[in-house]
Image (cartoon, rainbow, N blue to C red):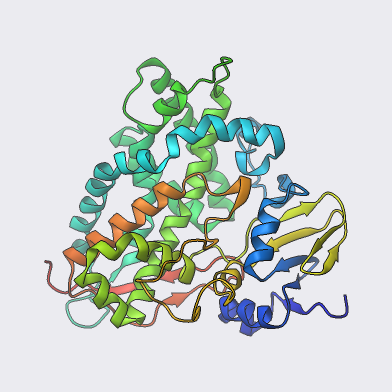
Amino acid sequence: MADVPELDMTDLALLRDPSAAYVRAADGSPVARLTGPGFAFWVVLRHAEGRAVLADPRLRTDEASYQRPDVPAGCLPYMTTMSELNGAEHARLRRLVAPAFTPRQAERFRPRVERIVDALLDELPGHRSDDGPGDGTVDLLAHFARPLPMEVICELTGIPAADRPRWRAWGADVAAGHGAAFAEAIPGILEGAKAAVARARAEPGDDLISELARVQEEDGDRLSETELVTMVWQLVLAGQTPTNLIANSVAALHEHPDQLAALRADPALMPGAVEELMRWCGPQLLTIPRFTTEDVEIGGVTVPKGEPVTVAIPAANRDPRVFADPGRFDVRRDAAGQLGFAHGPHFCAGASLARVQTAVALGSLLRRFPGLALAGPPQRVPDPGTARLLSLPVTLGAAG
């Protein structure tokens, strides 16, 4: 224990730039202790050890891995998502949902994502505020990155158009991640999800819920009504990844004008650029905690049974043992192997959809507004677990 460094989650330097703090710690040790008021985690700082932890069946997620919101009793059956399950339970659900989340399926949904993105971009000029310089500013987080994933979820789950403004508001509440508004949004989301599942059962359509409802194993196993509703809830939670990734990406590209210019000049770079953006500024800084089911050696350190373990994704994603010149942002880099979508059994099921959504959003934004510029430094939330912005004021310039 004496050789294991300690990181204080309340330290101002860590809160201001958690990625840099985790990367610095990785220079000296593959493992550290991450402490805060009343708790402590083991945090894995290097790529090889992080991949091993995320694939190790001796480390398991459970309900203690998540902050459970205070919801009515009727909502509780839908709160246990696939992310909390392990072993055979998790493998069963993964098999049943996997056909709906393949890269091919994500590409099939691309035209519908493009229509949603175009509609949001049509609305952007109407959100201009005269408080900023030039032709006014728009908060790209509030009016584009945040509503986009919920609009996509509504489209892919067959939510009627009349209900979508309400879902967009719920999405904003869920994006906050905690508090009364977050908990109060959940019953409405679940009721809407139940109605969507009922519609998909009665009249299957070309949507994700209908696809999930059609999947049936050779032995007759299929997702139950409760499991289908829970999947909608998990999609809503997971929707915060593209929200923050898109906002972080716009900021990163404008902070690296040479990379922005390269991407504008060659849109074919976009798929690889999304992977590099996930490596460079992916929103999840720490993986969901896993608990050791026995004593486990990680990076030469014995972690006792029952201890929470997380992986510092920015440190793993800037590990010089895996990525050449890892402190350089390069949209031409082959960033395969980055851990932004995790690894192992709990690799993000919706990763392909998130990639398509991010690529469409960034590509369309750059084409539509070639003069887009930051209106000031991005306002970052001091959060050691999630890289996210409070707002992203931009000037749009002339539309292309």
Q: Relative to 157, does residue 391 appear above or below in the rendering? A: below
Q: Is residue 362 left or right of residue 208?
A: left
197 and 214: which one is in front? 214
Residue 166 in view (yes/no): no
On the image, the x and y values in percent for residue 370 come to 17, 71
Q: Is residue 292 left or right of residue 373?
A: right
61 and 371: which one is in front? 61
324 and 95: which one is in front? 324
Residue at 42 percent across and 40 percent down: it is 102
* Residue 395 falls in image quadrant: bottom left
Residue at 66 percent across and 54 percent down: it is 54
* Residue 272 falls in image quadrant: bottom left
On the image, the x and y values in percent for residue 242 come to 42, 56
On the image, the x and y values in percent for residue 237 come to 52, 48
Residue at 25 percent across and 62 percent down: it is 268
234 and 43: which one is in front? 43
Residue 329 in view (yes/no): yes
Q: How many marks?
A: 0
Q: Is residue 40 left or right of residue 189?
A: right
Residue at 35 percent across and 57 percent down: it is 358
On the image, the x and y values in percent for residue 294 come to 86, 51
Q: Is residue 260 left or right of residue 381?
A: left
Quadrant placement of the C terminus: bottom left
Quadrant placement of the N terminus: bottom right
Q: Relative to 153, does residue 325 appear above or below in the rendering? A: below
